[in-house]
Image (spheres, grey):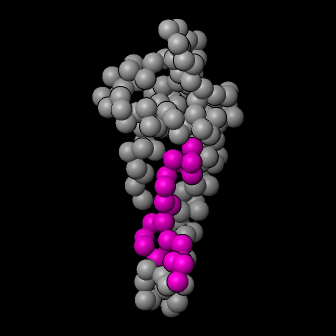
């Protein structure tokens, strides 16, 4: 499994904000630290803000900060919120409106169940950690 850059940057942004809780941080600052596009980061911040992970303060003295204490931000929740599609393979995608699946072997294949179990384990591990613990092992 590979997380999208959107999720990668979202996690990095939250870690950075979690380290700098003593002040507001700008999008420009985060973008420069990680060498990413400010325009792309704006979209990520918007999505994180919608979920309450980040609070944005407008105006001359505005900036970004965590939307709630780092100890209450579960990493699995961030991944679930930022990943558009958690399907590891096409047959794990939802059934189409016409009832068809993306794979002709879907009814007989056991791989889907194995991959689902693996994905569940991955998310389960992410659910065991909060952003409050992350700076300890992410810095």
- Please state which of residues 58 and 30 is positioned toward the viewer in this rendering: 58
* Residue appearing at x 43%, y 23% in the figure: 27
Q: Is residue 95 magenta?
A: yes
Q: Is residue 136 visible?
A: no
The overriding secondary structure of the stretch rendered in magenta is loop
In which quarter of the view is residue 26 placed? top left
Q: Is residue 74 left or right of residue 3?
A: right
Q: Can you say which quadrant of the picture contains the C terminus?
A: top left
* Residue appearing at x 63%, y 28% in the figure: 67
Q: Position of residue 35 (x, y in %)?
A: 30, 28
Q: Can you say which quadrant of the picture contains the N terminus?
A: bottom left
> What count of labels does the image hold?
0
> With respect to residue 75, does 125 lie above or below?
below
The residue stretch that appears in magenta: 78-98
* Residue appearing at x 64%, y 35% in the figure: 52
- Please state which of residues 33 and 60 is positioned toward the viewer in this rendering: 60
Q: Residue furthest top?
A: 61
Q: Position of residue 129 (x, y in %)?
A: 62, 41
Q: Is residue 27 magenta?
A: no
* Residue appearing at x 46%, y 77% in the figure: 91
> With respect to residue 36, does 79 lie above or below?
below
Q: Position of residue 126 (x, y in %)?
A: 58, 48
Q: Position of residue 78 (x, y in %)?
A: 57, 44
> With respect to residue 28, does 97 lie above or below?
below
Q: Is residue 121 visible?
A: yes
In which quarter of the view is residue 36 placed? top left
């Amino acid at each position: 499994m590979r997380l999208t850059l959107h999720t990668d940057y979202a996690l990095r942004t939250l870690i950075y904000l979690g380290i700098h809780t003593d002040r507001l941080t700008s999008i420009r600052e985060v973008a420069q630290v990680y060498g990413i596009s400010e325009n792309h980061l704006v979209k990520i911040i918007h999505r994180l803000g919608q979920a309450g992970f980040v609070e944005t303060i407008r105006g001359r003295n505005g900036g970004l900060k965590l939307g709630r204490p780092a100890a209450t931000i579960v990493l699995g929740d961030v991944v679930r919120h930022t990943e558009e599609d958690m399907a590891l393979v096409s047959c794990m995608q939802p059934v189409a409106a016409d009832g068809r699946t993306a794979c002709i072997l879907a009814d007989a294949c056991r791989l889907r169940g194995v991959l689902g179990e693996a994905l569940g384990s991955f998310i389960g591990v992410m659910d065991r950690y909060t952003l409050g613990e992350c700076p300890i092992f992410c810095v």
